[in-house]
């Protein structure tokens, strides 16, 4: 059974610092990996999707890498801003199915 | 365009009551998913529809949980005889493609969720 772990569970940084969020998964046979952002009381917003054949994806200040063989992905957020404060979730999709298996999330606070 | 919508946004039920949660997916999306998110945890898969067919219901925690999508569009998640452990946020997501889709057709778009509190 696929298990997804996110460390740390919570992170607090001053504005301007770079953020590094880690995600690990136990079964490397994945179809893709997706990073989401969740604001309190809101749904999930997709940030980046990495196909299993890709090594990384970039969007603005966000960069996500994928090392499928070691079961790890990292989300980098450059020059953090208070508006980046949210919970970040990673999720993997198994090759043969459609459901997403989520990690527990990392709660990020960027202090002005 | 309009995103995924869910109603009600908040629901308070007394233990033992039945509840029905509605999801309106993005128009034309083939795939629809339900997830349950307990406080402080990541979402967990409940069930999956491709059009009106329920292809995977392996995540439904008990036979008190029932989901349907009769016309391949709107979906309803029903919980019978609610228990306190059912308290959670119920998220619905839709996706344009089907199993094995690639690229953007594989992205799931989430609604805001329904927060269910069982007293």
Image (cartoon, coloured by chain):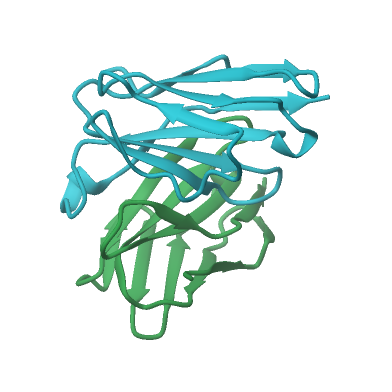
Chain colours: A green, B cyan
Q: Residue at x 41, y 77 (%)?
A: A27
Of A35 and A92, nearer the camera is A92
Q: Kindly indicate the quadrant of the structure image that contains residue A65.
A: bottom left
Q: A48 above or below A83? A: below
Residue extending farthest to the right is B119
Residue extending farthest to the front is B63
Left or right: where B90 falls relative to B84: left
Left or right: where A42 falls relative to B97: right
Residue extending farthest to the top is B8
* Residue A36 image offset from top left, x and y in percent: 45, 48
Looking at the rendered image, the quarter that the C terminus of chain B falls into is: top right
Left or right: where B22 falls relative to B99: right
Left or right: where B83 falls relative to B8: right
Q: Residue at x 41, y 53 (%)?
A: A100
Looking at the rendered image, the quarter that the N terminus of chain B falls into is: top left
Q: Kindly indicate the quadrant of the structure image that contains residue B48.
A: top left
């Amino acid at each position: 059974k696929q298990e997804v772990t996110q460390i740390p569970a919570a992170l607090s940084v001053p504005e301007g610092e770079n953020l590094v969020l880690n995600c690990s998964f136990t079964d490397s046979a994945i179809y893709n990996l997706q990073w989401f952002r969740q604001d309190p009381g809101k749904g999930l917003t997709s940030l980046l999707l990495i196909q299993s054949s890709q090594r990384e994806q970039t969007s603005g200040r966000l960069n996500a890498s994928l090392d499928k063989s070691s079961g790890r992905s990292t989300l980098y957020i450059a020059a953090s801003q208070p508006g980046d404060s949210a919970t970040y979730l990673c999720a993997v999709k198994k090759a043969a199915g459609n459901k997403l298996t989520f990690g527990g999330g990392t709660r990020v606070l960027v202090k002005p | 365009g309009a995103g995924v919508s869910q109603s009600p946004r908040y629901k308070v039920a007394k233990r033992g009551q039945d509840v029905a949660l509605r999801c309106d997916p993005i128009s034309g999306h083939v795939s629809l998913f339900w997830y349950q998110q307990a406080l402080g945890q990541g979402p967990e898969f409940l069930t999956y529809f491709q059009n009106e067919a329920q292809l995977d219901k392996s995540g439904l925690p008990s036979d008190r949980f029932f989901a349907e999508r009769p016309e391949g569009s709107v979906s309803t998640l029903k919980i019978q005889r609610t228990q306190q452990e059912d308290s959670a946020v119920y998220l619905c997501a839709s996706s344009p493609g089907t199993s094995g889709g690639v690229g953007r057709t594989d992205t799931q778009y989430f609604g805001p969720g329904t927060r269910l509190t069982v007293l």
